[in-house]
Image (spheres, rainbow, N blue to C red):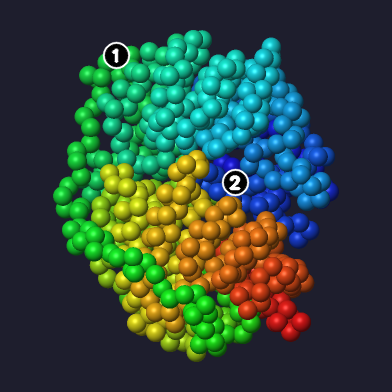
Amino acid sequence: MTRAGSPGPGPGVSGGRFRRLGLSELDTYFAMARGVDAEPALELTKWFATNYHYLVPEIGPETVFAARPGKAAGEYAEAAALGIATRPVLVGPATFLLLAKPADGCPRGFRPFDRLDDLVTAYAGLLGALADAGVGWVQLDEPGYAADRTVEEIDALRAVYARLAGLTHRPKIFVATYFGELGDALPALLGTPAEAVGLDLVAGSANLQRLAAAGPIPGRTIVAGLVDGHNVWRTDLRAAAGRGATLTGLADHVAVSTSCSLLHVPVDLNAEPDLDPRLRQRLAFARQKVDEVVALGRALRDGVATLPESAPPAPAAWRDDAVRARLAALQPGHLRRGPYPDRAAQQALLNLPPLPTTTIGSFPQTGDLRKARAEVRAGTLDQAGYAERMRTEVAHVIALQERLGLDVLVHGEPERHDMVQYFGERLAGFAATRSGWVQSYGSRCVRPPIIYGDVARTAPITVEWATYAQSLTAKPVKGMLTGPVTILAWSFVRTDQPLADTANQVALALRDECRDLEAAGIRVIQVDEPALRETLPLRGEAQQAYLDWAVGSFRLATSGVSDATQVHTHLCYSEFGEVLPAIGALDADVTSIEASRSRMEILDDLRAAGYGRGVGPGIWDIHSPRVPSRAEMTEALRHAVAAVPAERLWVNPDCGLKTRGYAEVEASLTHLVAAAREVRGA
């Protein structure tokens, strides 16, 4: 498994389809991440309930595991040479295999988790090598156990750390868990000789109750995740100190930490002088969270009198009574459109052929577009000049799509630097940062906005761009919006009211936008919800309540338009087969789903679920620079037609095209259109 930050590199995994390429270790890494002509990339999906992505390992019975300590030991030595004591952070072996998938050609019934003993042998070698390098502590991350796990999986966790901690030549072991409560996995871990166990006491407050019920924990360090590493609000230090004090009465040693890696928050609030001072005093970025950890550690040692005052309450001006009144007046009918069979006539009204072709929304964000935004920030380009450059790009994108023969067009989103931040900058109740970058995958970073108050739309957001694009063509152009769940998931959300309430406030703003798009003549509206699965709680007992409000907020956003307007949604880079009933309940007319990296696995789920609406499984992996051939796309499309009736099947890439170049885009879309025409004529 590959991800940046914590956790880092672990044992080498060789074998499978990339081994035969004969590449260097570094080139193999890039081939796995980006793909090459001979092999598509590994599947890309979300790291638990975050917007960070990881590459899904492909494990088979013949996969070879080997200890490769070079990177971890080298980075440890580099820090030591600077006088900095560190600990290597690795994905734990159990979580590694729980998140892996069977490689192609595996025997029926094979599970990567079946290889756990072999992988632990490699970890044992790795720990020995790190000990030889002088490493005193190593951190093994096991967040997989914040989800529901079987008795077999929990017993395996106990056996893994009994074995690794039983080694005579190794660093001390810190098993870190985060993103929720551990349930029965907690006593399993505490029953091993591992020297330290880390617990999330923010998202997993029940961990503290379970520890208290278990009684004293001798001879062990409990690393208490008392500071939220997944959001940007200041910690209530006195409340956190109270939880820490409870722990000090249970364990021989308590260390204070963040609830998870600080990878998920911006670096330093001091880099944000433009934020409203009333908001700034309520925030803590990574640098400030480190200060909070230090303050809590001092308070547990010296008393809470050393703690600074808590943040003041939110100003009354951040409340919008008109929005709250609209939500209070909602009736069930506001969340319903006409029956889907009646809406199926949309295809004919739009004059679309079988297997209509489209893209997901964005086109390449070129250097010229980025330069124009930089000139606006520098004050050398005014808004009128910027808008003219964006209109020129929209005209180029429309002309290109018409020339290539696509059926439903997009305006390309040149004016949007990010699909969430763009809306956050135009909705009341949001704040945008100047330097609040957070890594999403590889070198791609985003600046999540901060939702601090009631959300309201003060003016149309996308109508001008959509109607301009539509004026350039007789083909339908999609209005492009980001859905309420995704806007919440990819923002830092207020914690003083339920998520469902904030989602519905965002949904009301989008509902007004949808109705304005329709009134302006836009006949297809796409409301993207790629975070629908990502935000699903890890524990089954909380999942249905989440899905109820998530689906409800989407339907609130989209049910204000007529049945003649075709509503699309888009989902990507998560395991959506697990939430297919909820996807159906969204009641979108067409759902496009990323599918190429997973080799169209979603089709089996759609077939088994009897999914009965329009669907577009992606046939082009847009996160790889390789251009799939026409034959490759045709094969994928024929596979799709075998699972989804042709009258409900759409043809599209996996995701938006902003990260690609125009040469790749034109070649790939040419093949996509040709594949659709070939399969139509079969």
Name the residue: 55% across, 44% down: 47
Dividing the picture into quarters, in which one does residue 481 lie?
bottom left
Q: Which residue is mark 1?
A: 302
Q: Position of residue 300 (x, y in %)?
A: 33, 17
CA distance for labels 1 and 2: 41 Å
Residue 54 is marked as: 2
SS type, badge 2? strand
Amino acid marked by disc 2: Tyr
Location of residue 134 (image quadrant):
top right
* Lower position in the chain sequence, tag 1 or tag 2: 2
Query: In the depicted view, which residue is nearer to us: 26 or 299?
Result: 299
**Residue 337 occupies which quadrant of the picture?**
bottom left
* 591 over 602 or under it: above or below: below
Farthest residue toward the left?
316
Rate crowding at label 2 as few (under 14), some (14 to 19) or many (20 or more) other CA atoms within 10 Å: many
Q: Is residue 42 left or right of residue 417?
A: right
* Marks 1,2: beta carbons within 8 A: no
Position of the N terminus, as image quadrant, is top right
